[in-house]
């Protein structure tokens, strides 16, 4: 269950990271509120997952999901550049996340 919670926390990290773009410096009320909600929920779920997962693994997986997801959504939503090196780099992040999962006892 901790891994599921950690993945949800990572996905919420993507939500708040992308949400920051929509807040326009926290000058827009609703995007700001949704971003803050996602941020708090992401941190709370990360803390819950860390009860039973090693801190290094949990934090690294959380950041990896957030980083990879934010890059992909940046490309899709904001037309950020897409090239081979960026895609390979995201793939390496995901391989690192998978490696940490495999190397961590359940």
Image: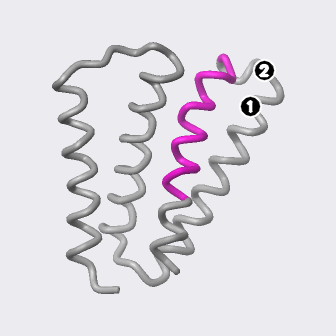
Question: Residue 106, how many percent across, how many down?
Answer: 35, 86
Q: Is residue 59 left or right of residue 1?
A: left
Q: Is residue 16 left or right of residue 106?
A: right
| Nearer to us in this view, 80 or 21 | 80
Q: Is residue 11 left or right of residue 90?
A: right
Residue pictured at 58% horizontal, 50% vertical: 12
Disc on res. 100: none
Q: Residue most toward the right?
A: 29
Other-residue count near label 2 (Cα within 10 Å), few / some / many at <14 / 14–19 / ≥20 = few
Question: Residue 97, how many percent across, how many down?
Answer: 28, 58
Disc on res. 28: 2
Cα separation, mark 2 vs mark 1, equals 6 Å
Question: Residue 77, how many percent across, how many down?
Answer: 53, 21
From this view, report whether residue 64 is shown above or below residue 20. Answer: below
Which segment is the magenta one? 9-24
Residue occupied by mark 1: 32
Residue 20 on the magenta span: yes
| Nearer to us in this view, 27 or 95 | 95
Say which element carries label 2: loop
Residue pictured at 30% horizontal, 18% vertical: 82
Other-residue count near label 1 (Cα within 10 Å), few / some / many at <14 / 14–19 / ≥20 = many
Residue pictured at 51% horizontal, 71% vertical: 4
Say which element carries label 1: helix
Evaluate if marks 2 and 1 touch, with contact meaning CB atoms under 8 Å apart: yes
From this view, report whether residue 105 is shown above or below residue 17. Answer: below
Q: How many marks?
A: 2
Residue pictured at 73% horizontal, 47% vertical: 37
């Amino acid at each position: 269950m901790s891994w599921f919670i950690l993945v949800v926390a990572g996905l919420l990290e993507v939500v708040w990271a992308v949400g920051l773009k929509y807040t326009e410096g926290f000058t827009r009320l609703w995007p700001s509120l949704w971003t803050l909600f996602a941020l708090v929920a992401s941190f709370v779920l990360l803390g819950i997952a860390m009860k039973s997962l090693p801190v290094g693994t949990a934090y690294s997986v959380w950041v990896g999901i957030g980083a990879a997801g934010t890059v992909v959504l940046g490309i899709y939503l904001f037309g950020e550049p897409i090239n081979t090196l960026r895609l390979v780099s995201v793939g390496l992040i995901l391989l690192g996340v998978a490696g940490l999962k495999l190397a961590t006892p359940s």
